[in-house]
Amino acid sequence: MSETDLGELGVLITRPRLQAQELAARLESCGGRPLLCPVIAIAPPLDREPLVAAARALASYDAVLFTSANAVDALFEHVPAGSVSCFVAAVGTATEQALERRGVRTDLLPVRFNADGLLAALVERFGDELPNMRFLFPRAEEGRETLPSGLLERGAQVDLVVAYRTVPADEEGPRLVEWLTTGAIDLLTFASPSAVDMFCRILERAETSGDARPPMEIARELPSVCIGPVTARRARERGIHVACVPERSDVSGMLEAICSLSPAR
């Protein structure tokens, strides 16, 4: 890619700031204008004791499943160094990298970076062993049921524990509204259904003055790139135009999708 591929395309990144850094840097290297507006923040569970207890009992599980980097960071705040002896599965490369930063090797990475892909990979890897296995699944408070339900249906034991919560970053509202009303944003990006919900929540609560157009109305006229089909489905449900869903649900896939939509391409 050349530095002018994106032609100064204004790309809104709605992920939490730390998780947005890699995509923002790669967009800048391709000539884009990353606009960081984390519409969600990561908060600890209201009751931390189940997470702490699960971390201390990690060695008693056959496998631990991670579907986000946030879950990795939350659990390993309470896991003693060098105590990971069970099988470790990660949903995608970002989660795998989070494990690497903790010095933990990923034993299983699916071909498709989503819950369905991870379930399929686990079934292929363990097959008839699943009824005899005990899994730990630390996840967001509002996590999907695809993975645990699929394992339970096959006879496995799955211990769900809330590792973190996503909460709205309402303080970002004024900046988001300003970018929308001044035309600074050319493309929206979403990396989770919760980001879609919080984005809409902020705009629907935003105050407008005079004859100004509602910011939600402006947002619905913009194209968006959603990291996977579940996020895309939520965006469409909220009236957001989904222009592209990348084949790979990671930063490289998102960047490729963004470049494919750039007028400068």
Image (spheres, grey):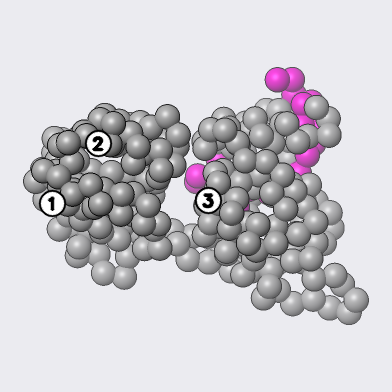
**To which residue does mark 3 refer?**
230
**For the residues bearing labels 2 and 3, Cβ distance under 8 angstroms:** no
Label number found at residue 56: 1
| Helix, strand or loop under label 1 | helix
What amino acid type is highlighted by mark number 1?
Arg
| Helix, strand or loop under label 2 | strand
Mark 1, Cα crowd under 10 Å, few <14 / some 14-19 / many 20+, is some
Q: Give how far apart the Cα atoms at labels 2 and 3 are.
A: 24 Å
- Point out the tag, 2 or 3, that comes first from the N-terminus: 2
Mark 1 vs mark 3: give the one in front: 3
Label number found at residue 210: none
- Point out the tag, 1 or 3, that comes first from the N-terminus: 1
Out of 222 and 110, give the one closest to the viewer. Answer: 110
Q: Quadrant of residue 253?
A: top right
Q: Is residue 19 magenta?
A: yes
Can you say whether 216 is above or below 148 in the image? below
| Residue 60 placement, left or right of 135 | left
Label number found at residue 88: 2
- Magenta segment: 1-21
Q: Residue at x 45, y 34 (%)?
A: 112
Q: Give how far apart the Cα atoms at labels 2 and 1 are.
A: 16 Å
Q: Residue at x 65, y 30 (%)?
A: 256
Mark 2, Cα crowd under 10 Å, few <14 / some 14-19 / many 20+, is many
Q: Is residue 189 magenta?
A: no
What amino acid type is highlighted by mark number 3?
Val
Out of 60 and 152, give the one closest to the viewer. Answer: 152
Mark 2 vs mark 3: give the one in front: 3
| Residue 64 placement, left or right of 38 | left
What amino acid type is highlighted by mark number 2?
Val
Residue 76, horizontal then vertical, whole percent: 25, 46
